[in-house]
Image: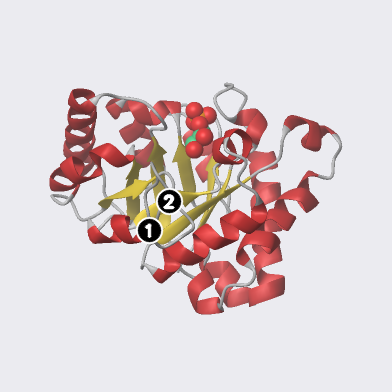
Amino acid sequence: MRKRIVAGNWKMNKNLTEALSLTSEVVNMVRDEVRGDVEVVLCTPFIYLTSLKKYTDEVTRISLGAQNCHQNASGAYTGEVSAAMLASIEVPYVLVGHSERRQYFGENDELLAQKVKIALENGLKPIFCCGESLQQRQNEDFLAIVKAQLTASLFDLSPEDFGKVVIAYEPIWAIGTGLTASSDQAQEMHAELRAHVASHYGAQVADDTTILYGGSCNEKNAAELFACPDVDGGLIGGASLKSREFTNIVKARM
Ligand code: 13P
C-alpha cells in the first residue's frame, strides 16, 4: 500500500526563532488533530534540522527532510551538504530536483540521477520533483516531458531502490503563482506517471509509488486535489509556512 504524505517545503524562509515556533505549533496541532495514516514531512533549511529534530521526534507521524544534498560523497565542495551528513543526523527525507534547483542552480537530469543514487546509498528517501513549464504545457507535450524526467533520473534504479522514492509532480507554472492545477489536470498527470512507472517496473511497484502534487496547494483546494485517485498527498510551499493552514492541509489528506 502506498503512503499518504503531506510535506512542507519551507524553501529559504524563517529565522531560527520562527522555525522553532512553526515546528512546535505544527507538531502540537498534528498530534492533537490528525488521525489516520497520513505522514507529515517538514523540509526545512539545513541549518535548522538538528534543532528541530527534538520536536518532530515527539510525534511518530512527523519527520524531517532536507531540501537538497550534494551528488558526491565528501570532499572539497565548499558550502555543500552531503547525503551522509544528513543520514548522520537521522534526517529521513531529502528533496531532489526541485524546479528551483533545476532553474537557478542548473541541475539537470544526469546530476539528479546522481543525487538520487547517493541519497539512497545513505539510506535517505528522495522526494523527486518533476514538472513542466508554462510554455511546455502550452505546447501540449507536457506529459512526455515529465515522463522523460522520471526516465532520465530514476529508471536506472533497481525496483527495490525505486520503491523508496517519493515522486512530487510540481507544474512550474503553478509554483508560488496562485495558479493551481485543476484536479483534472493533476489526476491526468499523476495517472500518466503511474502508468509510466508500471511500464518500467510493473503494476505492483507503480501501485505502491507515492505521487504528491505541489503548486499553490492550500487549505481551500487541498481536499479536492487529494480526492483524485492518483494524488497521494502534497508538497506544500507557501502554505507550509503557516501552522494552521499547513495542518488543515494535512487534515484534508486524512
Ligand atoms: P507553493 O505551494 O508556494 O506554490 O510551492 C510549491 C513548491 O514549490 C513546493 O515544493
| Colouring mode (rainbow / by chain / secondary structure / one colour) | secondary structure
Disc 1, SS: helix
**Type of amino acid under label 2:** Cys
243 relative position to 204: left or right: left
- Marks 1 and 2, the one that precedes in the sequence: 2
Task: Classify mark 1: residues with Cα within 10 Å, few (<14), some (14-19) or many (20+).
Answer: many
Viewer can see residue 18: yes
Give the CA separation, mark 1 to mark 2: 6 Å
- Report the label total: 2
Disc 2, SS: loop
Task: Classify mark 2: residues with Cα within 10 Å, few (<14), some (14-19) or many (20+).
Answer: many
Decide which of 218, 126 is in the foreground and name it. 126
Q: Is residue 153 above or below residue 202?
A: above
Q: Is residue 103 above or below residue 115?
A: above
**Type of amino acid under label 1:** Ala
Instruction: Name the residue rendered at 66%, 54% in the picture.
Output: 109
Q: Position of residue 42 (x, y in %)?
A: 32, 42
Give the labeled residue for mark 1. 83
Instruction: Name the residue rendered at 79%, 37% in the picture.
Output: 136
Tell me: is circle 2 under 8 Å from ligand 1: no
Give the labeled residue for mark 2. 69
Q: Position of residue 239 (x, y in %)?
A: 41, 27
The image's mark for residue 22 is: none
211 relative position to 202: left or right: left
